[in-house]
Image (cartoon, grey):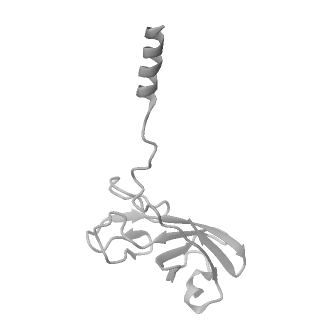
Amino acid sequence: MRKIIFALFFCTLLNCSNTDDLGNCFRGVSLNETINLSNPQFINIQVPGGHATANIGGRNLLIIRRSNSAFKAYDLQCPEGTCNSPMTFDGLKLICSCDDKEYNSLNGSPLDGEGCFALEYNVLQINNNALQISR
């Protein structure tokens, strides 16, 4: 009986793992804001391919319109946490201004394959003139 209990205990130890996402460098960031696309600062995202930056809910965000109904939103804080300057966007990728590290604007992944992803927000188009951005 002891052998069975020991075997079960040992198997349990082997199967335990930390399920924390080690690549998530933005713990505790939450946002739930609605923006009006009729606002002049968002004029560039009224057409597919356009983008705009804005301070929304206290966070600097980049909003990209991929198609008529698809949007992406990224936090402009550098994911590695070693930079106080916001990232820039060159139309294809996000660039951390302190170390020139680049991130894919399709999914936020680091182009060199190492480190944290850019923080992506959920974007829901409520109607033709409003987006809800949340995390």
**Can see residue 53?**
no
Q: Which is nearer the eye, 50 or 14? A: 14
In the rendered image, the quadrant that contains the C terminus is bottom right
Q: Is residue 26 visible?
A: yes
Q: Is residue 13 above or below residue 120?
A: above
| Image: 85 above or below 71 | below
Horizontal and vertical percent for residue 131? 65, 75
Relative to 99, 92 lies left or right: right
Q: Position of residue 128 (x, y in %)?
A: 72, 79
> At which x and y percent is residue 79?
37, 64
* In this picture, residue 118 sits left or right of residue 66: left
| Residue for point 41% across, 59% down | 117
Quadrant hosting residue 2: top left
Which residue is depicted at the point 37% across and 59% down?
A: 110
Q: Residue furthest left?
A: 99
Quick check: 69 above or below 128? above
Is 99 left, or right, of 87 in this rendering?
Answer: left
Q: Residue at x 46, y 43 (%)?
A: 19
